[in-house]
Image (cartoon, helix red, strand yellow):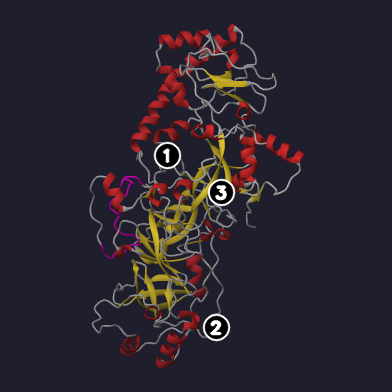
């Protein structure tokens, strides 16, 4: 079922319901009563200004002359500059309220600011929340300080470990927001990718939806929130603008809409979290509650269970040490047994079973047509390389058959593909080319072994298995009708290539058009859309890419910063395409455009355009994944140090066949 964004404020309301709704926003009530002049003559943190009196039911916080209150009745809070403990401000030591106890005050002086920096970098509250409703007894404070001292050595070691990790992982990640900007560049919608998290549950999330997000312009020491509207969507990434900025885009910011810090409107009120307008616009309004009621009336927000659905969609059925059959990257004509070593966002790092050190691996998505259940090869008559491993590792289990994509059932009893029939197919060793191909062997269950004319190995080791419904094989004449360049067989000199002449010369026939897949889904892709795409010649890499052409369900994918010769033809439902922000969401390393990467990385070997007998190619120069690293590194956070510190926390007569190719209504010219 589709997610529907919730319309959370009716257009009409009674005076009583409006008042009740206004009270539920969880605002800092002080905004309704404060003067527009929020300037303060004192900026010293040691200033001991008096706080204006408010009713006892409204505990207060004093900051820069503004009075704020907590909606849940908690008193104003403070953070100890020595140990990082959070407690009620009035219970803290000294007039300045900088320390929770006299011991912390003295330790701060003797240890200078070293311990304070550690406490702040820790970025999390004590294991047990301090509920300082009154001043703690001296013995309790001394015990807490003793425990603090005992933890210092551990904290110092942990900090050193973090700094080492930061030194290894690239500091600067690719910024999709800056790359897309606010212009006419668009990202493909999440709904175009049914295999990604939330791909089938995205619903009508669109521009104009309101969310509650952290306010980074509050000027307050604690984490507060404010409401923002979605200005632009690009995949999982959203360009947001805080309410109150109107047409001012100066404070617009990009974020991933699926991260935990994005909430539906009403979340703050339900959880007692403070809503605070950005400091730079506080002077624009004296009654922010009324402002929110007005601007949110009739608007939509995220579904209440949006975060839960994101988490559920991030659960994947494949587990480590599951056994599968996967294409042998050194001999495409056969499969081998491999073990699941790692699962990231549904992508599997498979290690061939005979490999003892884990270096002989292969990356693919769990919905890839390249992986199958154990016994699949024997069942359809596909070549298979038996494993020399006699003993299984503890925990190994064959992956259940229901985890794999089911292909469409076909009837092979009537007119069907036959050995020697000609067709057109995407070359698995050069995915930018659609070539002349031949059916070399017909397998069971609708599978075919296909060879590329003019470049086949003598032993057939480069034959490739396609299902008859595969969107990567086409009838003869498909490229000509759709003005796609058709690559003739290597060494063929009668150019321009004509199918009629070629079939006569080779004494072969073209596969009937009716045997090919004719389904064209309403995929939603448009030329110019940005996405993240796997480089299928080096399948461990996911790169910044653009859809440059669409022919029915066939997409031409261009890798930004690279020459067109590296483009790849991909099906619109390929599990190797992802929306903008997928890498960030799942923790997979995203390869930046080559031009951008070359500015930040040292020179590397130029990528060679060369056919290989392996199902992979030369690594893109400019890749930010080190050659020694067998798996993608997680994307660096922004800012880089913050996240790591928080971890502490493809038979009719000749003429008839050709006539059929050119008269089929499905393959008439149609482009976007």
Would residue 391 be visible to someone looking at this image?
no
Looking at marks 3 and 2 on the same chain, the residue that comes earlier in the sequence is marked by: 3
**Percent from the top left, x then y, of residue 433?**
34, 70
**Crowdedness of circle 3 by 10 Å Cα count: few (<14), some, many (20+)?**
few
Position of 230 relative to 460 (above/below): above
Q: Earlier in the sequence, mark 1 or mark 2?
A: 2
Is 611 part of what is drawn in magenta? yes
Q: Quadrant of residue 487?
A: bottom left
Q: Is residue 527 magenta?
A: no
Where residue 667 appears, as percent x and y from the top left, is 45, 80
Question: Label 3 belongs to which residue?
Answer: 315
SS category of the residue bearing label 3: loop
Q: CA distance from mark 1 to mark 2?
A: 57 Å
- As drawn, 164 above or below 208: above
The image quadrant where one finds the C terminus is bottom left
Frontmost residue, 539 versus 137: 137
Q: Which residue is mark 1?
A: 637
Q: Which residue is mark 2?
A: 413
Mark 1 or mark 2, whichever is nearer to me: 1
Circle 3/circle 2 CB separation < 8 Å = no
Q: Does residue 404 appear in this view? A: yes
Judged from the image, the secondary structure of the residue bearing numbered disc 2 is loop
Front disc: 3 or 1: 1
Q: Which residues are magenta?
A: 609-629
């Amino acid at each position: 079922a589709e997610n529907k964004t919730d319309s959370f404020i009716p257009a009409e309301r009674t005076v009583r319901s409006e008042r009740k709704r206004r009270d539920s926003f969880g605002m800092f009530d002080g905004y309704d009563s404060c003067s527009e002049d929020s300037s303060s003559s004192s900026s010293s943190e040691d200033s001991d200004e008096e706080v204006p009196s408010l009713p006892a039911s409204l505990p207060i916080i004093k900051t820069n002359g503004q009075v704020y209150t907590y909606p849940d009745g908690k008193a104003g809070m403070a953070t100890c500059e020595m140990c990082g403990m959070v407690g009620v401000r009035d219970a803290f030591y000294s007039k300045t309220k900088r320390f929770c106890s006299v011991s912390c005050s003295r330790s701060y002086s003797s240890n200078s600011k070293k311990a304070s920096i550690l406490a702040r970098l820790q970025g999390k509250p004590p294991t047990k929340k301090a509920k300082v409703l009154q001043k703690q007894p001296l013995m309790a404070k001394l015990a807490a300080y003793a425990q603090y001292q005992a933890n210092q050595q551990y904290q110092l070691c942990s900090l050193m470990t973090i700094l080492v990790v930061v030194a290894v992982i690239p500091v600067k990640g690719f910024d999709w927001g800056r790359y897309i900007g606010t212009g006419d560049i668009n990202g493909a919608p999440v709904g175009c990718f049914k295999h990604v998290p939330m791909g089938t549950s995205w619903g009508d999330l669109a521009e104009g939806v309101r969310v509650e997000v952290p306010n980074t312009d509050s000027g307050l020491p604690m984490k507060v929130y404010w409401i923002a509207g979605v200005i632009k969507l690009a995949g999982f990434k959203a360009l947001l603008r805080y309410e109150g900025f109107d047409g001012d885009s100066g404070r617009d910011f990009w974020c991933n809409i699926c991260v935990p810090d994005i909430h539906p409107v009403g979340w703050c009120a339900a959880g007692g979290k403070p809503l605070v307008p950005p400091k730079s616009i506080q002077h624009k309004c004296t009654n922010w509650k009324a402002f929110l009621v007005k601007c949110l009336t009739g608007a939509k927000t995220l579904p209440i269970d949006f975060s839960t659905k994101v988490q559920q969609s991030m659960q994947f059925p494949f587990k480590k040490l599951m056994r599968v059959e996967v294409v042998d990257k050194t001999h495409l004509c056969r499969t081998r047994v491999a073990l699941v070593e790692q699962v990231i966002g549904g992508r599997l790092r498979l290690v061939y079973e005979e490999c003892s050190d884990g270096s002989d691996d292969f990356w693919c998505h769990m919905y890839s047509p390249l992986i199958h259940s154990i016994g699949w090869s024997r069942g359809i008559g596909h070549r298979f390389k038996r494993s020399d491993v006699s003993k299984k590792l503890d925990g190994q289990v064959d992956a259940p058959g229901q985890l794999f994509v089911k292909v469409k059932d076909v009837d092979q009893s009537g007119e069907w593909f036959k050995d020697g029939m000609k067709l057109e197919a995407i070359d698995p060793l050069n995915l930018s080319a659609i070539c002349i191909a031949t059916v070399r062997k017909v397998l069971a269950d609708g599978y075919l072994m296909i060879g590329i004319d003019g470049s086949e190995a003598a032993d057939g080791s480069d034959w490739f298995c396609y299902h008859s419904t595969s969107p990567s094989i086409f009838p003869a004449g498909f490229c000509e009708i759709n003005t796609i360049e058709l690559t003739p067989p290597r060494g063929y000199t009668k150019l321009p290539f004509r199918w009629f002449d070629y079939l006569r010369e080779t004494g072969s026939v073209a596969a009937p058009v009716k045997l090919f897949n004719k389904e064209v889904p309403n995929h939603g892709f448009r030329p110019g859309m940005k996405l993240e795409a796997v480089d299928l010649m080096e399948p461990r890499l996911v790169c910044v890419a653009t859809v440059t052409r669409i022919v029915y369900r066939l997409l031409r994918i261009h890798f930004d910063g690279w020459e067109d010769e590296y483009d790849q033809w991909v099906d619109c439902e390929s599990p190797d395409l992802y929306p903008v922000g997928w890498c960030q969401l799942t923790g997979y390393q995203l390869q930046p455009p080559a031009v951008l990467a070359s500015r930040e990385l040292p020179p590397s070997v130029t990528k060679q355009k060369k056919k290989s007998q392996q199902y992979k190619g030369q690594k893109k120069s400019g890749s930010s994944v080190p050659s020694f690293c067998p798996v993608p590194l997680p994307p660096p956070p922004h800012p880089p140090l913050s996240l790591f510190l928080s971890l502490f926390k493809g038979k009719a007569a000749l003429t008839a066949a050709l006539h059929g190719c050119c008269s089929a209504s499905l393959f008439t010219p149609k482009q976007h």
